[in-house]
Image (tube, rainbow, N blue to C red):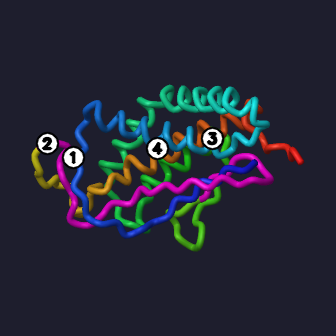
């Protein structure tokens, strides 16, 4: 089984979120990563019908606990990406933060994918099936704002900001991928056997 984290850049519509340093954003990262990890676990739970519910529940709970255990660390990474607010194809700080964290978790990192210096893939495991996880971490022009409940422009020199939550999405994708890698490493999640 192979997990491939493949950060890509997309143009997103302008959505204003208010990234305060409060509980709601930390919970958003944690919940997004939990849902992603749990969803991947359920997709991979290709066990005989009678064992499927118990095994999937155990894997899901373990993956969620992994995400929860990294909650504070994930929040710190998201905040660094928020503060860096780097435009697409120029996210050197953000890309390094995520790639380095995945590498420390045992992923094989390939940087500069498709000739883009800030694009990377992170792989864990081998063979099939391949689980693909997308993470975004680019900021958008004209969305620079302070971390306050009222809209206020932050003086960050480039005018870019994370109004679409990519600082949260990239971090949640990273955390969920690490949770799934831990399941594979512990042999809790493995390639399904054929039950023909």
Element type at mark 2: loop
Between marks 1 and 2, how big is the CA–CA gap?
Answer: 6 Å
Between marks 1 and 3, how big is the CA–CA gap?
Answer: 32 Å
The local crowd at label 2, few if under 14, some if 14 to 19, many if 20 or more residues have their Cα within 10 Å, is few
Judging depth in this view, the residue of 154 and 42 nearest the camera is 42
Earlier in the chain: of badge 1 and badge 2, it is 1
Earlier in the chain: of badge 2 and badge 4, it is 2
What's the residue at 38%, 36% (across, down)? Answer: 75
Mark 1 or mark 3, whichever is nearer to me: 3
Vertical side of 176 occupied by 115: above or below: below
For label 3, the residue is 42
- Residue 179: % across, % down: 59, 36
Q: Determine the image quadrant of residue 90.
A: bottom left
Judging depth in this view, the residue of 107 and 17 nearest the camera is 17
For label 1, the residue is 18
Element type at mark 3: helix
- Residue 2 at least partly seen: yes
What's the residue at 33%, 52% (across, down)? Answer: 165
The local crowd at label 3, few if under 14, some if 14 to 19, many if 20 or more residues have their Cα within 10 Å, is some
Residue at the far front in the pictured view:
50
Check residue 127 for magenta coloring. yes
**In the shown orientation, is residue 105 left or right of residue 135?**
right
Element type at mark 1: loop
Mark 3 or mark 2, whichever is nearer to me: 3
Earlier in the chain: of badge 1 and badge 3, it is 1
For label 4, the residue is 172
Check residue 169 for magenta coloring. no
Magenta segment range? 121-149
């Amino acid at each position: 089984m192979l997990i491939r984290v493949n950060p890509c850049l997309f143009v997103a519509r302008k959505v204003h979120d208010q990234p305060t340093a409060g509980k709601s954003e930390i919970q958003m990262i944690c919940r997004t990563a939990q849902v992603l990890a749990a969803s991947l676990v359920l997709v991979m739970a290709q066990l005989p019908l009678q064992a499927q519910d118990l095994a999937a529940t155990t894997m899901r709970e373990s993956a969620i606990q992994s995400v929860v255990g990294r909650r504070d660390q994930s929040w710190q990474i998201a905040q660094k990406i928020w503060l860096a607010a780097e435009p697409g194809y120029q996210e050197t700080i953000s890309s390094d933060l995520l790639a380095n964290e995945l590498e420390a978790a045992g992923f094989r990192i390939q940087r500069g994918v498709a000739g883009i210096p800030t694009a990377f893939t992170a792989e864990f495991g081998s063979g099939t099936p391949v689980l693909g996880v997308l993470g975004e971490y680019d900021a958008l022009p004209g969305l620079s704002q302070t971390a306050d409940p009222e809209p206020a422009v932050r003086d960050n020199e480039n005018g870019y900001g994370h109004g679409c939550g990519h600082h949260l999405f990239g971090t949640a994708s990273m955390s969920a991928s690490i949770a799934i890698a831990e399941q594979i490493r512990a042999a809790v999640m493995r390639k399904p056997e054929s039950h023909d």
